Image (spheres, rainbow, N blue to C red):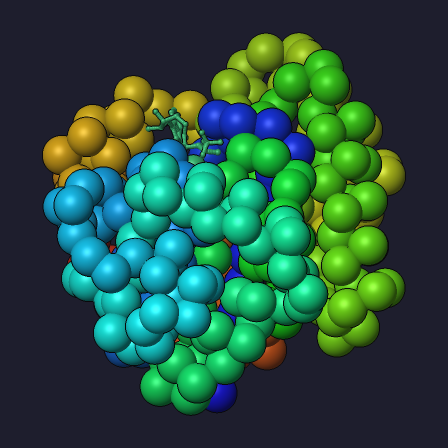
Amino acid sequence: MATTISILSQKGGTGKTTTTRTLADIFARLGLAVLAVDADPQGNLSDYFDVSPDASPTLAEVLAGQVLATEAIHNGVIPANLQLAESELILAGKIGREVTMRNALREVKRDYDIVLIDCPPTLGLLTVNALVASDQAILSTEAQYFSLQGVEQAMEIFNLARDSLNPDLDLLGIVLNIANMRTRHARGARESLRSRFPDKLFNSVIRQSIAYAESAERAIPILDLKPERGQDYIDLASEVLTRLRRKDLLAALERLRQDRVPASVRR
Ligand SMILES: Nc1ncnc2c1ncn2[C@@H]1O[C@H](COP(=O)(O)OP(=O)(O)OP(=O)(O)O)[C@@H](O)[C@H]1O
Ligand SMILES: [Mg+2]
């Protein structure tokens, strides 16, 4: 039975999709069976998996109960497009609207080790559905003055999902993303997050690099395009696996590092 992890944030452009894509790639390279779910009508994750924009069926049909989740997997991802925005509106008027995704993914979870859900940049019904369908959540945040505030708002939705519908939901961690740690305000953001969430902030920081935009645009995982950049994500994956109590995979992760990252920049 898969461990399901939602990647969310209170606002847009915090690196959620890049984190989902890259962790999916790394876990797959470790030999895990990984399913990614694009829960964002923008469909960025689907693009990153190189799934055609008119691929069908998508998450919209799965949530509508028209097809099984297994029938909607293309290239390792259940994709999304603008139709998902319509699904969200339709869902809003239904009984059980918050548990639709959980029910829709229940069967397919048996076939995977990890399911990663990429949330949209709003804390609306799709994000609540993703959290209710998950065992764990990763909060992504940029290193800005208002990071703490954004994380607090995302935590409110997290708490709501846990307290009302999914008591087993855990916060796996908070990742500082697209960060330029040379700036004082980024370091300040890190310190305020660390003092507010001492056990939850990941030590690994995903540094800012233009390589990620190219990776997404060309639909080539960062470990293939710029492995030295991907090292930040190898560090993050190591912490994620440790928190998931999968230390048995750390040796394979270090072999992946040796294999992909040039010795001169290896940590
Ligand atoms: N570490 C990074 N450094 C620089 N740019 C990055 C980094 N990670 C992602 N990006 C780029 O920043 C933009 C936003 O990233 P991404 O799409 O992963 O964020 P998101 O939180 O999923 O956005 P949205 O909320 O719109 O779904 C993209 O153009 C992406 O290529
Ligand atoms: Mg996104």
Which residue: 35% across, 61% down?
61
Which residue: 77% across, 68% down?
165
Which residue: 57% across, 54% down?
91
In the rendered view, would you say 139 is above or below 79? above
Residue 263 relative to residue 133: left or right? left
Work out which residue is located at the far top of the displayed protein and give it.
184
In the rendered view, would you say 114 is above or below 263? below
Residue 186 drawn at (x, y percent):
63, 19
Residue 57 drawn at (x, y percent):
24, 60
Residue 43 drawn at (x, y percent):
33, 40
Of 11 and 92, the residue lying toward us: 92
Place residue 65 in its image quadrant: bottom left
Of 21 and 229, the residue lying toward us: 21
Residue 250 drawn at (x, y percent):
43, 72
Residue 21 relative to residue 239: left or right? left
Q: Can you see residue 152?
A: yes
Place residue 213 in its image quadrant: top left
Residue 259 relative to residue 187: left or right? left
Q: Can you see residue 132?
A: no
In the rendered view, would you say 76 is above or below 182? below
